[in-house]
Structures are given as structure tokens and as C-alpha cells.
Image (spheres, rainbow, N blue to C red):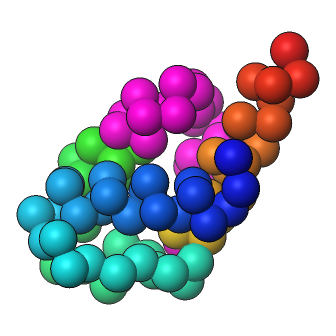
Amino acid sequence: MNRDAITNRITEIFRDIFDDQALIITDRTTALDFEDWDSLEQINLLVAIEKLFDIKFSVNDVENLADVGQTIDLVERKLFEKLSD
């Protein structure tokens, strides 16, 4: 799966969680861009991403994610690792 496809699918997760079908995210999108993005929403996002892509994140994977771009990079890496197993 290429980066654009991953971004599109993650965008749909954001739209569902934040209940905004017009929502646009970029690699530089952060929690500071959303009034409602708190620690609970962070967990909801990560769990939804794990389920959608059938991957698992460790605490080390996610503890320093600074923006959506880093999250997409992580998903790419996890999908690559999954294919390599």
C-alpha cells in the first residue's frame, strides 16, 4: 500500500473520530490543530488505525509521534514489517 492510500484511509479515521466529513489532514497536522484532540482521542485514533491496517503499535512506537506524517511513516513501516514476516 502506498503512502497516498494510507493517508486517505487515515483521513477517513480522523473524519469519523472528529465527526467532520470535510476534514483535511496533512503530514504536519498535530493535536494542536484540533480543540478536541486530547489523550483519549489519541488512543481512539491509534486503536482505529491498528484495526484498519491489522497492525499493532508498541508504546515505544507511539510515545514520540509529533504529527500525522510521523504516524503515516509508522504505519508504512509496520505494514512493511508485516509483509516481511
Compared with 55, 75 (above or below) is: below
Q: Residue 53 in the image: state x and y as whole percent.
A: 52, 34
**Residue at screen point 17% across, 71% down:** 21
Q: Residue 1 in the image: state x and y as whole percent.
A: 69, 47
Outermost residue to the left = 19
Q: Residue 45 in the image: state x and y as whole percent.
A: 34, 48
Q: Can the viewer see residue 39? A: no
Residue 6: name its quadrant: bottom right
**Residue at screen point 20% across, 80% down:** 22
Q: Residue 43 in the image: state x and y as whole percent.
A: 33, 43
Magenta span: 47-67
In the image: residue 29, left or right of residue 67: left
In front: 43, or 83?
A: 83
In the image: residue 85, left or right of residue 9: right
In the image: residue 8, left or right of residue 3: left
Asked whether 8 falls inside the magenta stretch, the response is no
**Residue at screen point 53% across, 63% down:** 7
In front: 10, or 57?
A: 10
Compared with 68, 42 (above or below) is: above
**Residue at screen point 86% across, 15% down:** 85
Compared with 29, 10 (above or below) is: above
